[in-house]
Amino acid sequence: MSRSEFGEFLIARRGQLQPEQVGLPAGRRRRTPGLRREEVAALAGVSADYLARLEQGRDTNPSMAVLGALSDALRLDEVERHHFGKLAMGMEQKASCPKSGQAGEEVSETLRAVIDALHPTPAFVLGRWLDLLATNPAWRDLAEPIGMFDAAAHNNLAYYVFAHPDAPRYFGNWAEAADVIVSALRNAQARFADDETLEARITDLQRYPEFDRRWREHRVTDYRSHRLRVEHPLRGTLEIEVETLDPAADQSVNVWLVDRRQVHAPALRLVNE
């Protein structure tokens, strides 16, 4: 995975940059969008042949200096640089890394107690494939009216966002939510490179054009801390701050803060300390 993903990331990102964004003249109309390989190589201070080897997976050991120079040339932000670095580390270490093993789908009693203790703050536990593994009553009350438990959602956040016909109507900032989902799956793919079930899920999700486009563009954003704008059929417009915490190797606790003032609620200290 990592070798091809690293090269595909390079190709996708230079294809998304316009010459004027990096201080180059636009020139005549280009046959393909974005920057040419030679232009990125010049901006990064490497040879075009070396960049070609990286993109094609024929060189799998770029130095930290090269990674930094390419990150600058491609105008990567902090989240993108971190992802880029993980892909590079995966190229070098994949062969020697231990298998990630079977996904842990069983939620411990302690973790269940944590999300229950957060009530009335909505909270739930996600698995590495973005399956809903456990929820508290507050989140169920909030999520059920917007179709989170409908058959089309397959008990999975990614399928809800991309397969449920009403998700774009309920999520006022659906495009941002879609980017968050893709970023979470990108992180899982880099982290659990040998998970065949995860790869099968990603392949299946590529049936949906909006997922496929975002996946091919290799866009990554901060999936741990973001905002949702929910047009709720019973509660009206809700501005929700989402915080993701990783207490287990392949499970995460997701907290939906419907009111920012709840950040100071005593229950939240159970996961913040």
Image (cartoon, helix red, strand yellow):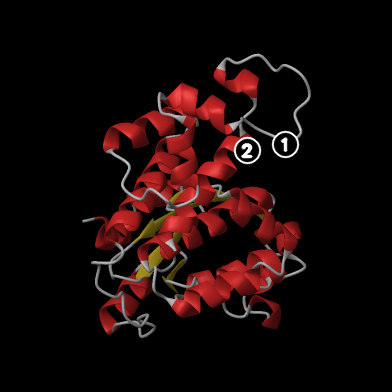
Which amino acid does the dot numbered 1 rest on?
Answer: Thr
Name the residue: 48% across, 55% down. 5
Q: Quadrant of residue 18?
A: top right
Q: Nearer the viewer, residue 173 or 52?
A: 52
Task: Count residues near mark 1 (Cα–Cα under 10 Å), then give few for <14, some for 14-19, many for 20+.
Answer: few
Residue 32 bears which disc, if any? 1
The residue sitting at 42% across, 37% down in the picture is 50
Name the residue nearer the viewer: 257 or 159: 159
Say whether residue 196 is left or right of residue 92. right
Residue 212 quadrant: bottom right
The tag earlier along the polypeptide, 1 or 2, is 2
Q: Nearer the viewer, residue 81 or 128?
A: 81
Asked whether disc 1 touches disc 2, contact meaning CB atoms under 8 Å apart, the reply is yes
Residue at left 68%, top 65%?
A: 162
Q: Is disc 2 surrounded by few (<14), some (14 to 19) or many (20+) residues within 10 Å?
A: some
Q: Which residue is mark 2?
A: 15
Q: Is residue 77 above or below residue 113?
A: above
Residue 61: x, y in percent?
Answer: 31, 47
Given this view, does label 1 or label 2 mark the residue nearer the observer?
1
Residue 260 position, x and y percent, is 45, 46
